[in-house]
Image (cartoon, rainbow, N blue to C red):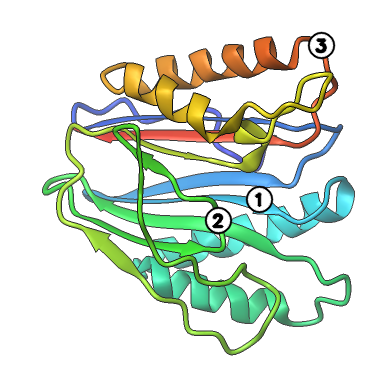
């Protein structure tokens, strides 16, 4: 838990909040962000498997992301370099799906790279994007980046599948439709309100069932 941010920026141009809830004592999900001048670098990821091995792989991924974000590299370059590093000596076949972004807090311009991760939502609509491959499986890949001209005053919501695939006692999943409906209703709420509400909704859906996966969420609004 100490590897992911627990405090969030207090700025007039940014509303950001994140939460990671491990399914076991240690988790393999991750999120992180770095602000350099008016550039916000952020990521959210889901490591294959659970437990100690996943947590160690997560730790390595976060440290590499932070180092490359501080070098102000583009998200596609960060993904490519992460993949090159994490495929080396990866005898356990671990991998991580990640969404990596760089938002200009002045213009609202977003560069991003999706590395095999489920698509985020922007104001309640799923973002259409190139999937790319998860990070850590195949060396030598060149990851493709994309961009959105202006995300100011829109809610960008990124999450792991511990949210939409959360199951109740009958193994019914929370599902994409419920998630999208809730985000449509909350697109004008604060980042913390969105995440707190979704946490409550997932817990209500589980209705006491043991969590089947780590649950991680990151909500961002450039103002």
Q: Which mark sits nearer the N-terminus, 2 or 3?
A: 2
Q: Is mark 2 on a helix, strand or loop?
A: loop
Q: In which quarter of the image is the N terminus?
A: top right
Q: Which mark sits nearer the N-terminus, 1 or 3?
A: 1
> Marks 1 and 3, how far apart in space?
24 Å
Which of pointers 1 and 2 indicates the residue nearer the eye? Answer: 2
Which of pointers 1 and 3 indicates the residue nearer the eye? Answer: 3
Q: What element carries label 1?
A: strand
In this rendering, does residue 186 appear at all?
A: no
- Percent across and percent down for residue 168 are 77, 20
Q: Is residue 206 above or below residue 147?
A: above
**Closer to the camera in the image, 122 or 75:** 122
**Closer to the camera in the image, 165 or 113:** 165
Q: Which mark sits nearer the N-terminus, 1 or 2?
A: 1
- What mark, if any, has residue 208 been given in the picture? 3
Question: Is 222 left, or right, of 156 in this rendering?
Answer: left
- What mark, if any, has residue 117 been given in the picture? 2
Number of other residues with Cα within 10 Å of mark 3, as a class: few under 14, some 14 to 19, many 20 or more: few
Residue position for label 1: 46
**Closer to the camera in the image, 47 or 129:** 129
> Marks 1 and 2, how far apart in space?
8 Å
Number of other residues with Cα within 10 Å of mark 2, as a class: few under 14, some 14 to 19, many 20 or more: many
Kindly indicate whether the residue at mark 2 contacts the one at mark 1 (C-beta within 8 angstroms). yes
**Closer to the camera in the image, 118 or 94:** 118
- Percent across and percent down for residue 122 are 31, 39
Q: In this view, does 29 lie above or below 137?
A: above
The image quadrant of residue 26 is top right
In this rendering, does residue 218 appear at all?
A: yes
Residue at 69% across / 29% down in the picture? 173
């Amino acid at each position: 838990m100490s590897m992911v941010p627990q405090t969030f920026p207090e700025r007039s141009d940014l509303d950001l909040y994140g939460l990671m809830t491990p399914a076991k004592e240690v988790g393999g999900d991750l999120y992180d962000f770095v602000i350099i001048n008016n550039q916000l670098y952020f990521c959210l990821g889901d490591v294959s498997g659970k437990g100690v091995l996943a947590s160690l792989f997560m730790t390595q991924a976060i440290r590499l992301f932070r180092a490359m974000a501080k070098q102000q590299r583009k998200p596609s370059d960060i993904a490519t370099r992460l993949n090159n590093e994490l495929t080396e000596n990866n005898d356990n076949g671990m991998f991580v799906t990640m969404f990596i972004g760089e938002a200009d807090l002045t213009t609202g311009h977003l560069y991003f790279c999706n590395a095999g991760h489920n698509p985020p939502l922007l104001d309640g609509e799923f973002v259409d994007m190139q999937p790319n491959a998860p990070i850590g499986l195949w060396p030598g890949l060149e990851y493709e980046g994309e961009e959105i001209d202006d995300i100011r005053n829109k809610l960008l919501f990124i999450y792991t599948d511990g949210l939409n695939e959360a199951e109740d006692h009958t193994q019914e999943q929370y599902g994409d439709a419920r998630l999208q409906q809730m985000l449509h209703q909350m697109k004008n709420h604060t980042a913390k309100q969105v995440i707190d509400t979704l946490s409550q909704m997932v817990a209500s859906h589980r209705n006491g069932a043991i969590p089947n996966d780590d649950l991680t969420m990151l909500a961002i609004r450039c103002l």
